[in-house]
Image (spheres, rainbow, N blue to C red):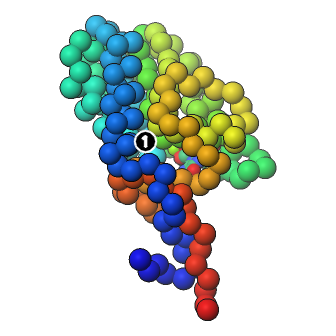
Amino acid sequence: MSSSAGISGIGRVLHRAEDVEAVVRRLAARIAADYAGQPLLLLGVLKGALYFTVDLARALAEIPGGPSEIVVDYACIASYGNSTRPSEVRLLMEGSAPISGQNVLIVEDIADNGFTLESFRAFLQERRPKTLRTCVLLDKPARRRVEVPLEYVGLVVPDAFIIGYGLDYQEMYRNLPYLAELAPPTPESR
Ligand code: IMP
Ligand code: MG
């Protein structure tokens, strides 16, 4: 496959689409059991957890005896930072579902340094949920700078930049149905 010079491309595939589906179903089974008979608010973090939240919500719907009702909502968070400085985390859009008194499950694409989840959890705690837990598709523990509780983890990934299934590189590649490493840019000229 050819790609434009200077643009980082799709590298090694880490998890195929069917493997990601199986991971989502496995997470849904655990969540369904833990929240059986109780209402649940799935709060997806945009944009990375766009697909993950949808697929998790649909997988939950297929499991009998799960939560009594499921509400899906999204918040949008942007984090800016690099490997040496803590990210600046900004909440760009708040969800519309009430948080107070609810069983809130944050659905996030990846726990990297942890600042995004730490800051979002603190924001939600102020709104007094009944319970607050976090479900991440991916955990990249090698890069963690702040400890955050992760009750549900889909896959542990190596210290590489990952794209696909919602995860982007400069807003590209989110729509890939699989998870891959980002390949280094091709030379400008050869
Ligand atoms: P944090 O470093 O844990 O605060 O994560 C910040 C955000 O960076 C995550 O929600 C992702 O959207 C993004 N991110 C972290 N690691 C990767 C990666 O490997 N690929 C794509 N996005 C990432
Ligand atoms: Mg994200």
**Residue at position x 39%, y 27% in the image:** 27
- Left or right of 113 on screen, residue 99: left
- The answer to which of 54 and 8 lies nearer the viewer is 8
Give the percent coordinates (x, y) of residue 71: 30, 24
In the rendered image, the vertical position of residue 41 relative to residue 144, given as above or below: above
Residue appearing at x 38%, y 57% in the figure: 176
In the figure, is residue 80 to the left or right of 62?
right
> In the picture, which quadrant includes the N terminus?
bottom left
187 with respect to 27 (left or right)? right
Q: Residue furthest right?
A: 84
Asked which quadrant contains residue 100, the reply is top left
Q: Position of residue 116 (x, y in %)?
A: 60, 37
Q: Residue at x 55, y 61 (%)?
A: 182
Q: Is mark 1 within 8 Å of ligand 2?
A: yes
What is the crowding at mark 1: few (fewer than 14 residues within 10 Å), some, or many (at least 20)? many
Q: Quick check: can you spot residue 144?
A: yes
Q: Is residue 121 left or right of residue 137?
A: right
Q: Amino acid at mark 1?
A: Ala
Q: Residue at x 71, y 53 (%)?
A: 82
State which quadrant residue 21 falls in: top left
Q: Residue furthest bottom?
A: 190
Q: Secondary structure at mark 1?
A: loop
Observer able to see residue 97? no
Instruction: Measuring from the top left, give residue 138's x and y in whole percent.
Output: 52, 39
Q: Position of residue 168 (x, y in %)?
A: 49, 56
| Residue beneath disc 1 | 49
Q: On the rendered image, what quadrant is the C terminus found in?
A: bottom right
Report the label total.
1
Q: Is residue 90 above or below residue 174?
A: above
